[in-house]
Image: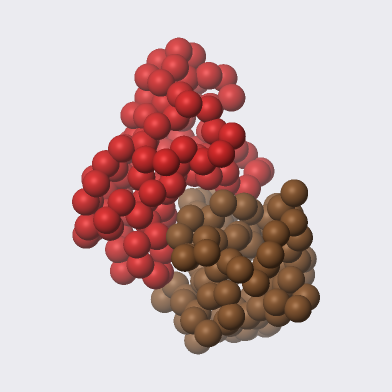
Chain colours: A red, B brown
Amino acid sequence: DIQMTQSPSSLSASVGDRVTITCRASQSIGGSLNWYEQKPGKAPNLLIYDAVSLHSGVPSRFSGSGSGTDYTLTISGLQVEDFATYYCQQTYSNPQTFGGGTKVEIK
Amino acid sequence: EVQLVESGGGLVQPGGSLRLSCVASGFTFSAYWMTWVRQSPGKGLEWVANIRQDGSEKSYVDSVKGRFTISRDNAKNSLYLQMSSLRADDTAVYYCARGGVLNGRQEYWGQGALVTVSS
């Protein structure tokens, strides 16, 4: 199974900050990497798919990059509504696996 | 509007069984892979199982193999998860999610069904 290591596990940031979250796969996943946002008590929402593609309706301050084993989610200009937990997921092979999550908190 | 509505969650004793259902609407159910994802209280997301459009291919996370069975009924726009030999560590919110045409990302999610395994 492919292991996904996400870092950091938590971070504190202020409104307007640029935030970067990284995800590393235990083997190359060929860009089959998705990012989700989850708020307490709610289902996850897809933000980015195939490493770099913005899901419909997602604000352009979210962006994804990476290839091979290393991927990044960037939020350019953190907004109040962005305080949440973020997960990466590889869909290169079954079983699809998630990273451990990054909780973004208000500084 | 795409909707996924789970049902069937509840309290079950260790060793017991439960079947979750997910009814889909707003899209051509038979055209998409479907997935179950769970989340234990206070923990992260765990992919559980998925199933191809025609049910011919199924995959499971190791921790549920031999105990859980994913299935679908395209005529009823429904996805199922039959869970048996349940353990305390199966306690979680179980989400139904729509995959892609070629497997891949989960674009739409249900609201989740809570399964609690406890005596």
Give me the residue at 52% from left, 71% from top: B50
Of residues B79 and A81, the one drawn nearer to the viewer in this rendering: B79
Q: Nearer the viewer, residue B44 or A57?
A: A57
Relative placement, left or right, of A11 versus B80 is left
Q: Position of residue B115 (x, y in %)?
A: 68, 65
Residue A45: quadrant of the picture: top right
Q: Is residue A53 left or right of residue A82?
A: left
- Give the total number of marks visible in the rendering: 0
Q: Position of residue B39 (x, y in %)?
A: 56, 56
Q: Identify the residue shown where x is 65% and y is 72%.
A: B30
Let me know if residue A103 appears in the view. yes
- Quarter of the picture containing the N terminus of chain A is bottom left
Along the line of sight, which residue is nearer the eye, A34 or B112? A34
Q: Residue A86 versus residue B10: which sits nearer the camera?
A: A86
Q: Relative to B86, say whether B118 is above or below.
A: above
Res B63 visible = no
Image location of residue A89, percent across then percent down = 41, 53
* Position of A90 relative to B88 (above/below): above
Compared to residue B24, the image places residue A85 above or below, namely above
- Residue at screen point 21% across, 51% down: A68
Instruction: Name the image quarter holding residue B55.
Output: bottom right
| Residue at image point 51% right, 41% down | A55
Residue B26 locus on image (x, y percent): 74, 56
